[in-house]
Amino acid sequence: MSTRDDPLTFGVLSTAGIARDAVIPAIAASDHAVGAVASRDPDRAAAFAEAQSIPRNYGSYEALLDDGGLDAVYVPLPNGLHAEWTTRAADAGFHVLCEKPLAVDAAEAREVTERCEDRGVTLMEGFMYRYHPRTERVLELVERELDDVRTVTSTFRFPLYGRPDDVRLDPALAGGSLMDVGCYPVSLARTVLGEPERAYAHASDTRDAGVDTELAGVLEYADGRSARVASGFDTQLVQRYRIDATNGWIEVERAFDAPADEPVELTYEVDGRRGVETFDPVDQYRLQVEHFADRIADGTAPLTDGAEAIANMRVVDALAESAAEGGAVDVS
């Protein structure tokens, strides 16, 4: 087992934009390093490696998994490929940081999680917002200051126009706004309120793509609490949430993909006392990478581990089923 002083060397399966723009720079800014990148296009892999100063590149994902100089694999592939390549990386003995969602549904997420457990590797799902100090502070306020939280309202939408071949519009790759960005509001609602009993959703496919491009859902709890979640590709960027309790509320803007180079805020009112807290710029992707490395070192489960991925996908599954079939669906 590695120790906290041992840096990790990552392999990256794909030249995806999130790898280029967020996670590879985050790894480079930490004590860890990217040792290799793979693409199904050898020329793309070589050009990407040169641009990102990555020492080795491969023209297939299989070849990267044969690289004995790596400790962990980062999987930023399209949603429909997450489970396959997380499993194959685990079979090769690598710890895995996989982008959200871990799998196409809860059953597949459970299979992947069990395989990683069998192989003795650490598995972490990349919900980077959970590692931001602002999120930690929100949860502290919920726990210590708010009495009886009754509702959570959370939205993540952005404009996806002029890219008809985008993988997020491909049903074969588990596209759609719920899978791509709706999983964040679901995660936030569950983190605050726990596991819902039932879900109801309405969705639209405004591109005739075979996936939802707009979705609005309600999560119901046995004691009358509720959450409202929304996602979409058809409006301008909005990512926010509000938590309402009997004695106050918390509001957060730029809630999930928080900028690394600007301060961010949360606003609250508790027992008539209103406040604004400001947080210095921080790279939540770097904090995510460092959490992953620490959990590998100490052998404990990450905050966003396989069990968390399974639980989140149960709710996503129920919302998707409700949107497709109509009516409320039990979360099971």
Image (tube, grey):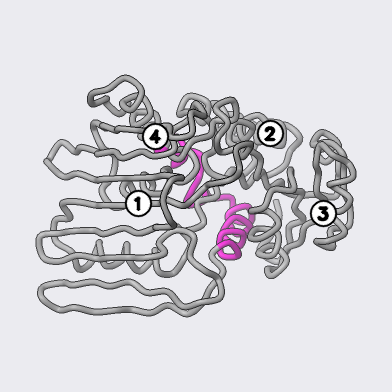
Q: Amino acid at mark 1?
A: Thr
Q: How far from the left and from the top, in percent, is residue 314?
A: 38, 31
Dot 3, crowdedness within 10 Å: few (<14), some or many (≥20)?
many
Q: Overall secondary structure of the magenta stretch?
A: helix
Mark 3 to mark 1 CA distance (whole Å): 33 Å
Q: Is residue 287 within the magenta segment?
A: yes
Dot 1, crowdedness within 10 Å: few (<14), some or many (≥20)?
many
Viewer-side label of 4, 3: 3
Q: How far from the left and from the top, in percent, is residue 58?
A: 87, 43
Mark 4 to mark 3 CA distance (whole Å): 34 Å
Q: Secondary structure at mark 1?
A: strand
Span colored in magenta: 285-312
Q: Mark 4 or mark 3, which has the lower sequence index?
A: 3
Q: In this figure, which residue is indicated by the disc labeled 3?
A: 48
Q: In this figure, which residue is indicated by the disc labeled 2?
A: 85
Q: In this figure, which residue is indicated by the disc labeled 4?
A: 316
Marks 3 & 2, CB-CB < 8 Å contact: no
Q: Amino acid at mark 3?
A: Phe
Q: In this figure, which residue is indicated by the disc labeled 1?
A: 155
Q: Amino acid at mark 4?
A: Val
Q: Secondary structure at mark 3?
A: helix
Marks 4 & 3, CB-CB < 8 Å contact: no
Marks 1 & 2, CB-CB < 8 Å contact: no
